[in-house]
Image (cartoon, grey):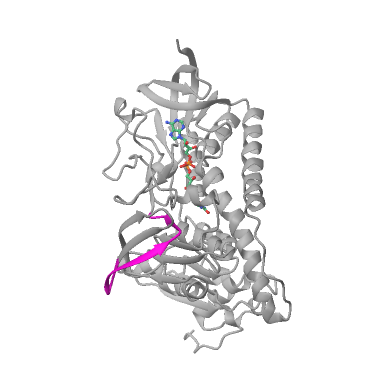
Amino acid sequence: MAEIQNTDLVVIGGGPGGYAAAFYAADSGMNVTLVDTETNPGGVCLYRGCIPSKALLHVAKLINEAKHAASWGVRFAEPEIDIDTLREFKDKVVNKLTGGLGQLSGARSIRSIQGWAEFRDNRTLHIRMHDGGEVELGFRHAILATGSRPAVIPGLPVDSPRVMDSTAALDLPDIPGRLLVVGGGYIGLELGTVYAALGSKVTVVEMTDGLLPGADRDLVTQLKKKLDASFEAILLNTGVVSAKDTGGEVEVTLRGPTGESVAHFDRILVSVGRKPNTAGFGLERTRVVVNERGFVVVDPQRRTGEEHIFAIGDITGDPMLAHKASHEARVAVDAIAGKKSVFEPYAIPAVVFTDPEIAWAGLTETEAKAQGRKVEVGRFPWAASGRATTLDRFDGVTKVLVDPESERLLGIGIAGPGAGELIAEGVLALEMGATVHDLALTIHPHPTLSETLMEAAEAWSGHATHLYRPKRPS
Ligand code: FAD
């Protein structure tokens, strides 16, 4: 017999969308219930996404820097990788953060239920709890934040332990001698970077003609040069036709520009995108509308086809990123509280945490071209940066996209170590409606990589101190 409970607001899913919504709603005085499959909040991002991948990328960075140090006259021995200790480090990071979120949730008196929620109708959820119990939960408002899962390629032997998705790859089962990464998007390249640093020979296959489809090519070029050296091979315009676990290895048939070929790997990582979790929990018993790609259709306040049910995060569509989910959370909670909220960010930053990192915000040159929109570009190569020179890292570029009429900044793109941290200044500039002159006239600390933003803005007018370019007529 299910226990009957009621709540003002139920949040389904405890990822960066769901827990941000639950915390903000509780802080705003609502009575909140948070349902998730895990004991503590965190979702994909903390348990099997952003956080464990970045902990491992930190280790990869250290290994690569230690190698690089030989050219400065500092030689370290080849690293000895203790995979069990490395896994423990990664798990410790995850447990510390998710445990902390559990405490923050408790401190806010959020009722936390570990279990699987399913709609009975548009006012009631049935929750099958982890401990075997059942709850029938009536709610006034609901926020759906059920996230996403890895997409699969039909025909690959998914039951083979040698064929991994990102979750399995983050579990670090071993360090495969030969790893095939299927998909040249950010998840494949980040995890490929980790495994290459640990010692795997990494091959990437990508269906399109370039890595990181959608990102500007001048940024990707910086990364591609480095990956060409650290990966075994990068095969573009190439797809997997079939794969067979032969016991000791996986035999893969690839189809590329020169036809079909067979190659052998110890493991495969399939990273070909993510699918929203919008099936299997009774949405069809509500008026919530799901589009042909499986995403929940929402209005600018993140309200679904049901007046009192909202949706946020990966299930509402691209970009499927943690910070976008957390921002939507605030918009939805404010809407529930009757405030005038709207989801209309000018810029949602995207960061690829490879080496070099790639980051962009606002309009990209690729988008401008597709839209037929005229933009002007100020570009500053890191070879001219004092700070980049002290780091012995010239593989970077910072650029600003400028509206020729208003001279307002439209977009920022950065490739280089630390680009993910640097982009935040660009996001603020874009959100504040800054012009290219605002950025150029802002005093930046020397010597830092942040100066490359200022110099890219200066370069737009032909007046960058550390670059000589023909001047723009005043
Ligand atoms: P999720 O984090 O997906 O959480 C959804 C939760 O809902 C899950 O815990 C799920 O179990 C639960 N759930 C689903 N259905 C039910 C149900 N019926 N009942 C109860 N619980 C349910 N993003 C970044 O911004 N930066 C990064 O660096 C980054 N790196 C990534 C690296 C990897 C390897 C991966 C896989 C993803 C990465 N992402 C990154 C993406 C990021 O993880 C997602 O965008 C983010 O987690 C989405 O948050 P969310 O709140 O929508 O849902």
**Residue 266 is inside the magenta segment:** yes
At a point 47% along the width and 55% down the height, the residue shown is 348
Seen from the viewer's position, the closer of residues 250 and 318 is: 250
Seen from the viewer's position, the closer of residues 241 and 312 is: 241
Query: Residue 7 placed where, x, y %?
Result: 50, 20
Seen from the viewer's position, the closer of residues 160 and 400 is: 160
* Above or below for 214 versus 471: above
Query: Residue 158 placed where, x, y %?
Result: 37, 47
At a point 49% along the width and 30% down the height, the residue shown is 337
Q: Residue furthest top?
A: 1
Q: Residue furthest right?
A: 74
* Above or below for 318 versus 410: above
Q: Which residues are magenta?
A: 255-272
Query: Residue 1 placed where, x, y %?
Result: 45, 10
Seen from the viewer's position, the closer of residues 307 and 90 is: 90
* Horizontal side, residue 468 vs residue 245: left or right: right
* Above or below for 231 versus 12: below
